[in-house]
């Protein structure tokens, strides 16, 4: 359930001309940039990038970088970039951060567990093309064990994407998860194999079976093992698989609550989910926090940045 509002018919030549006009003269017409790019899906934005390059012999991304500024520029460029390349850049930024806590590493989990198998494959290809090494190599060399072991397993998988569930395997694997968690062996091969290879529908059935068999939700038993990074990362994985809209609602909430705003996390959550399930995220946010996601975002942002995020949220500004 995407939140993006897109016209049925678009004309990439006219869109490119309108953007070019927005860049010319004194200052930039930010409203025109939002009107065009904020109402185009990934395929339409790709055609605009290609057409703009053909017409004006310059990169649209480069021009946006020179014309815009601040959080608004970051959000527009992230949105305009091809999704696989965008996520490859997000993954690389997370891996090259000086401090790689759960806030950074959850970006990799989102790409691996809250995206389609084909998208994950495209991200891995884009990563190799842009950074001259594989995503798996960079995880292994930049993230400490056992987190790297878990993350490599996730990003290197190619899950079956149809709704197929094996009831017998569900119960058996719920038992294997319970046994490993009881022993506090959270990096056990069984946990990594189950979480990184089974299809999403099978895993959701396994999580439900776990709760039915053992009384606690899987994430609660993981929490009971401790408060370290491994426990936290495993719970991000469970959330991204079981209910990605709940995970992204939490990411947005965490980005706007407390001292200051985490614009990078806020932008990432809205930009990457606007064409997937942002309507569900809005509903989940209201259920979890008894308030409107739109009101929360509006209260912590302003100007063109606020207007652009609201456009992706499907609000008419």
Image (cartoon, grey):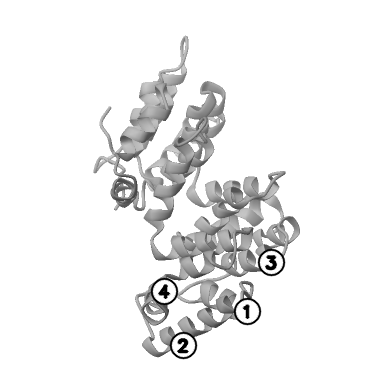
Q: Nearer the viewer, residue 45 or 4?
A: 4
Please report whichever mark, 2 or 3, sits nearer to the chain's N-terminal start: 3
Mark-to-mark CA distance, 4 and 3: 22 Å
Sequence-wise, which precedes: disc 4 or disc 1? 1
* Dot 4 and dot 3 residues touching (CB under 8 Å): no
Check disc 2 and report the residue beneath it: 172
Among the two numbered marks 1 and 2 on one chain, the one whose residue lies closer to the N terminus: 2
Examine the rendered structure and indicate whether residue 272 appears above or below residue 216.
above
Left or right, 172 with reference to 208:
right
**Disc 2, SS:** helix
Please count the marks in the image.
4
Mark pair 4, 1: CA separation: 18 Å
- Disc 3 vs disc 1: Cβ atoms closer than 8 Å? no
Q: Measure the C-alpha gap from mark 1 to mark 2.
A: 15 Å
Q: CA distance from mark 2 to mark 4?
A: 12 Å
Work out whether mark 4 precedes mark 3 in sequence or the reverse, and give the earlier one: 3
Depth check, front residue: 156 or 27: 156
- Label 2, label 3: how far apart the Cα atoms are: 24 Å
> Which residue is label 3 attached to?
146
Residue 171, image x and y in percent? 42, 86
Locate residue 212, reporting x and y percent. 36, 79
């Amino acid at each position: 359930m995407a939140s993006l509002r897109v016209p049925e018919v678009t004309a990439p030549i006219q869109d490119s001309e309108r953007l070019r006009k927005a860049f010319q003269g004194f200052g930039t017409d930010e409203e025109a940039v939002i009107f065009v790019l904020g109402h185009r899906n990934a395929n339409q934005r790709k055609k605009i990038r290609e057409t703009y390059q053909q017409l004006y012999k310059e990169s649209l991304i480069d021009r946006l970088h020179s014309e815009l500024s601040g959080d608004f520029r970051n959000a527009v460029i992230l949105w305009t970039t091809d999704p696989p390349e965008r996520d490859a850049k997000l993954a690389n930024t997370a891996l090259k951060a000086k401090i790689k806590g759960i806030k950074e590493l959850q970006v990799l989990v989102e790409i691996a567990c809250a995206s389609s198998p084909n998208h994950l494959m495209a991200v891995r290809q884009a990563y190799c093309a842009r950074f001259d090494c594989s995503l798996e190599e960079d995880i292994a060399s930049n993230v400490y064990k056992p987190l790297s072991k878990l993350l490599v397993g996730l990003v290197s998988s190619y899950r079956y994407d149809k709704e197929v569930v094996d009831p017998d395997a569900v119960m058996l694997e719920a038992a294997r998860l319970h046994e490993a968690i009881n022993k506090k062996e959270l990096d056990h091969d069984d946990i990594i194999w189950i979480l990184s290879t089974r299809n999403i529908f099978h895993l959701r059935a396994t999580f439900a079976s776990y709760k039915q068999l053992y009384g606690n939700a899987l994430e609660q038993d993981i929490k009971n093992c401790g408060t370290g990074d491994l426990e936290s990362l495993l719970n991000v994985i469970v959330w991204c698989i079981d209910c990605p809209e709940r995970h992204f609602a939490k990411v947005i909430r965490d980005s706007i609550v407390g001292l200051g705003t985490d614009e990078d996390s806020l932008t990432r959550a809205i930009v990457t989910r606007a064409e997937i399930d942002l309507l569900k995220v809005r509903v989940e946010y209201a259920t979890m926090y008894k308030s409107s996601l739109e009101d929360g975002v509006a209260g912590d942002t302003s100007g063109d940045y606020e207007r652009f995020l609201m456009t992706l949220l499907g609000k008419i500004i």
